Image (cartoon, helix red, strand yellow):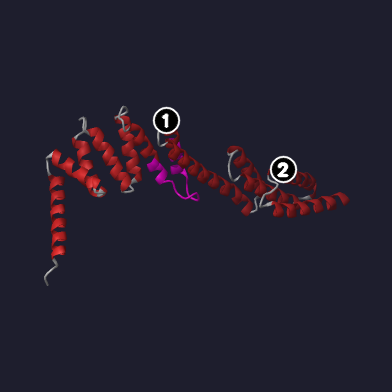
Amino acid sequence: MKLPNYLVVILLFFVVGCSDYQKALKAEDLGLKNKLAQSLYDQGKYRKAAQLYDQLKTLYRGKPQAERIVFFYANTLLETKNYILAAYEFETFVKAFPKSQKVDEAYFLMAHAYYMVSPNYSLDQTDTYEALDKLQEFINRYPESERMERANAMVQELRIKTEKKGFENAKQFNTIRDYKAAMKALNNFIADNPGTSFREAALFVQFSAASTLAINSVPYKKEDRLKDAKSKFKNFERLYPDSTHMKDAQKLLKDIEKEILTFASN
């Protein structure tokens, strides 16, 4: 079966392209490797470009061209979602070429690579804290950078993630009915994250835990715990009078007041 002419042209182009690439990989001509690596990068063929730049960064080590090659190599890794290695290569660039015109961009892209590996809030947040550290370093080093707005937005997003992790961990104690541990954990969470968007929910869960603990307490501890729970409600009401949790909080308050009256009559 005879192939259409346009398919023949495409196949020839593909074969020639692959042939040139394989030749460049094996070639000792650095200029050829460099030229093809840049061409592949410009075409968005980052995986192939990365292989050539990986060779070139070793071959050009200590030479003026190394600065450009290391930067482009790190970028190809970023584009191919090899984030951990990209972060390492950008950090290598920053340390090796501190006076480069690209150093602030490299520092930002290093932080961005760490940002990209930050997992869902329910998982371990070690990579998230690493990303936050790198972003804060970038912000401190380059306060006038044009990338500052993006860096601040990334920091805010990651902080919300770590705060949600902290809140969910603290709330878990309430879920498993360890109310004293829940109250302590939520208190620590609020103290450690004074500006958190989860403060309202944390205070409500803390009040809920205090209420349940008080109502189910042994007699000699009940009075003090009921008073403590009522105090937590008043604090919650003062801070968040229009809270979406207010109806549930008021129901709990009625139970507390009923228990207080019952306790006082005995």
User: Relative to 2, is 132 on the left or the right?
Assistant: right
Residue 8 is tagged as: none
* Residue that protrudes farthest toward the bottom in the picture: 1
Q: Is residue 156 visible?
A: yes
Near mark 2 (Cα within 10 A), the count class, few <14, some 14-19 or many ≥20, is few
Choose the circle earlier in sequence order: 1 or 2. Answer: 1
User: Relative to 122, is 47 on the left or the right?
Assistant: left
Residue sitting at x 70%, y 45%: 236
Q: Nearer the viewer, mark 1 or mark 2?
A: 1
Near mark 1 (Cα within 10 A), the count class, few <14, some 14-19 or many ≥20, is few
Residue 20 screen position, x and y as percent: 13, 49
What's the magenta region? Answer: 112-133
Residue sitting at x 74%, y 52%: 250
Residue sitting at x 50%, y 49%: 121
Q: Is residue 116 magenta?
A: yes
Would you name the residue on which mark 2 appears?
A: 238
Would you name the residue on which mark 1 appears?
A: 144
Q: Is residue 130 visible?
A: no
Which sits in the foreground, 19 or 206?
Answer: 19
- Contact? badges 1 and 2 (CB < 8 Å): no
Q: Is residue 200 magenta?
A: no
